[in-house]
């Protein structure tokens, strides 16, 4: 009886799907080309994304360097309308608005945060950092203070469940976003990935 065997010789075993070499240094021009391709791909995908109308819960400016740590270079370049995320392409952009938005169709099932409690807590934290003493607050008992901070912490956790959207007045070179990002302002937003409603999005402008 003839038997057919498979050679176990190393020289005859060639992986059908070899792993790519990940330790090869990338040339700067290759990096820029990859970045441009990523931005173009994002722009193509966002052209058919669903736009939503939502209500601003909280908006705050953050340094552009902090923003770049939150998203990929392709997403950052797309939102900031820049060629790349290199400093020389972002000379006039120092701040980015991070806006938390309530969208009924997307986050209507989530518990709605008590924004007055959140804003009071944020204001108190800011005062403490700046050395400002709230005499009325200092008169409270320790138990009362713990109760207030407990309420603030619970409402802040609720707030952090809602999606964030980014925009930059400096990048857009316009002031039309200034009034719309105030609390309870109505805005139009767009997720960069329709299938991921918790993903990063872009604030497009006023929704009314």
Image (spheres, rainbow, N blue to C red):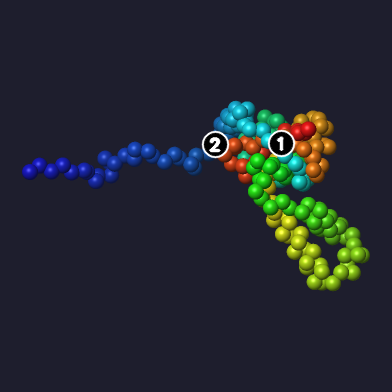
Element carrying mark 2: loop
Residue occupied by mark 1: 53
Q: Position of residue 168 (x, y in %)?
A: 76, 36
Question: Which picture quadrant has residue 118?
Answer: bottom right
- Nearer mark to the viewer, of 1 and 2: 1
Question: Toward which corner of the image does residue 179 lie, by quadrant?
Answer: top right
Is residue 193 among what the camera can see? Answer: yes
Percent coordinates x, y for residue 27 in the rendering: 56, 34
Q: Residues within 10 Å of mark 2 (few under 14, many from 20)?
A: few
Q: Residue at x 34, y 38 (%)?
A: 16
Badge 2 is on which residue? Answer: 26
Horizontal and vertical percent for residue 151?
76, 61
Vertical side of 36 occupied by 150: above or below: below
Residue 119 versus residue 48 in the image, above or below: below
* Left or right of residue 31: residue 54: right
Name which residue lies at 80% across and 35% down. Answer: 177
Check disc 1 and report its element: helix, strand or loop: strand
Most foreground residue, 178 or 81: 178
The residue lying toward the viewer, choosing from 138 and 102, is 102
Q: CA distance from mark 1 to mark 2?
A: 41 Å
Quarter of the image that includes the C terminus: top right
Q: Determine the residue positioned at 82% across, 72% down.
A: 142
Residue at x 76% of width, y 33% of height:
207
Determine whether label 1 and label 2 are within 8 Å by CB: no
Q: Can residue 76 be seen here?
A: no
Q: Position of residue 69 (x, y in %)?
A: 66, 45
């Amino acid at each position: 009886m003839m038997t057919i065997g498979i050679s176990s010789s190393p020289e005859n075993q060639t992986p059908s799907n070899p792993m790519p070499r990940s330790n090869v240094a990338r040339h700067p021009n290759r990096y820029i080309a990859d970045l441009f391709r990523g931005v173009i791909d994002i722009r193509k995908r966002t052209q058919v994304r669903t736009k939503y109308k939502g209500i601003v819960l909280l908006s705050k400016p953050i340094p552009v360097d902090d923003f770049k740590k939150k998203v990929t270079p392709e997403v950052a370049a797309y939102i900031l309308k820049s060629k790349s995320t290199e400093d020389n392409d972002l000379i006039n952009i120092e701040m980015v608005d991070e806006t938390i938005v309530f969208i009924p169709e997307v986050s209507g099932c989530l518990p709605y945060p008590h924004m007055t409690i959140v804003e009071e807590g944020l204001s108190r934290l800011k005062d403490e950092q700046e050395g400002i003493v709230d005499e009325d607050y200092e008169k409270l008992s320790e138990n009362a203070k713990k109760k207030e901070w407990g309420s603030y912490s619970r409402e802040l956790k609720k707030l952090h469940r809602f999606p964030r959207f980014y925009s930059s007045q400096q990048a857009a070179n316009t002031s039309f976003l200034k009034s719309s990002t105030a609390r309870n302002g109505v805005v139009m937003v767009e997720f960069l990935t329709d299938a991921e409603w918790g993903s990063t999005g872009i604030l497009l402008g006023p929704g009314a």
